[in-house]
Image (tube, rainbow, N blue to C red):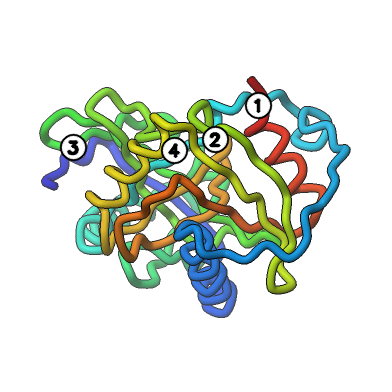
Amino acid sequence: MPFLLLNLSNPTNIMKKIFYSLVFASLAIIAGCTGRVQVENQIDCNVDPDEYFGQSYNASDFQFWRVLGESEAANIIDSLERMLGEIADDEADIESGGRLVHVPDTAAFGEALRKMTLKFADGTPYHYSWLKDEYTGDYCELLFLYGDAEGRPLIDGSHVDSASVVEWNGQMSVDFVFDKEGTEMFRKLTAATVGERLAMTLGESVLSVPRVNSEINGGRCSVSATDTEKACAIAAVLNKK
């Protein structure tokens, strides 16, 4: 998809080993979306999501977005690299567009990007988001996300029928099932994005960026979490009606 870059600029911290660990984590999530996950143990939850996240989220705040492909993201990054030198002196490494680039510190870069309007040449809006390492909190990848022509997510948690926290293969995850409409929306979405990455977000946080290997039927998916409390908080948000 052709794009138009308007007044861009951006930053982040990355370690190669952190990024690759997130890639492997995403592979586990892809398996979860196929519906073939064998549940070993369902966890009883008693977590207030508003208290955990420090703000109130509704199910519709859990969203799916397409992730701009590597070649297109690289073109944007080329423009960014030419523009970022004036923002800050401190540099960091960031993964984006399939390669490492050097950018100023994340705080200055993020502040600059928030003031920008980003649109493709056809007028479809897109936005940026940082992928963070769950354990260290460090930024590790810059993503460009987009939804429909109006800038809305492709599917959101309002189409989730139920969510629960399970432990499988020693990993904690939130297992959720779409309602009838959501199941068909998710099938069409995955059929149209085979080979691409999708971002699952909650508010401004990116929870996961799995790559779609094939069309997904059945309406069942999962997202991993670093601990039981976070998993329970995400499930509680998805179960809000």
Residue sitting at x 53%, y 61%: 32
Which label's residue is closer to the chain start, 2 or 1?
1
Q: Is residue 71 left or right of residue 2?
A: right
Q: Taking the image as drawn, is residue 165 in sight?
A: yes
Q: Residues within 10 Å of mark 4 (few under 14, many from 20)?
A: some
Pick the front one: 209 or 130: 209
Q: Nearer the viewer, mark 4 or mark 1?
A: 1
Residue 62: assigned label: 2
Which label's residue is closer to the chain start, 3 or 4?
4
Q: Are marks 2 and 1 in contact (CB under 8 Å)?
A: yes
Q: Where in the figure is residue 42, as x and y percent of width and height?
A: 77, 54
Q: Nearer the viewer, mark 2 or mark 3?
A: 2
Residue 57: assigned label: 1
Q: Where in the figure is residue 5, as x and y percent of width and height?
A: 21, 41
- Dot 1 falls on a residue whose secondary structure is loop
Residue at image mark 3: 120
Give the residue type that dot 2 points to: Phe
Q: Residue furthest bottom?
A: 17
Q: CA distance from mark 2 to mark 1?
A: 8 Å
Give the residue type that dot 4 points to: Ala
> Quick check: 200 above or below 61?
below
Give the residue type that dot 3 points to: Phe
Pick the front one: 117 or 143: 143
Q: Residues within 10 Å of mark 3 (few under 14, many from 20)?
A: some
Which label's residue is closer to the chain start, 2 or 4?
2
Q: Quadrant of residue 215?
A: bottom left
> Quick check: 121 above or below 140?
above
Q: CA distance from mark 2 to mark 3?
A: 24 Å
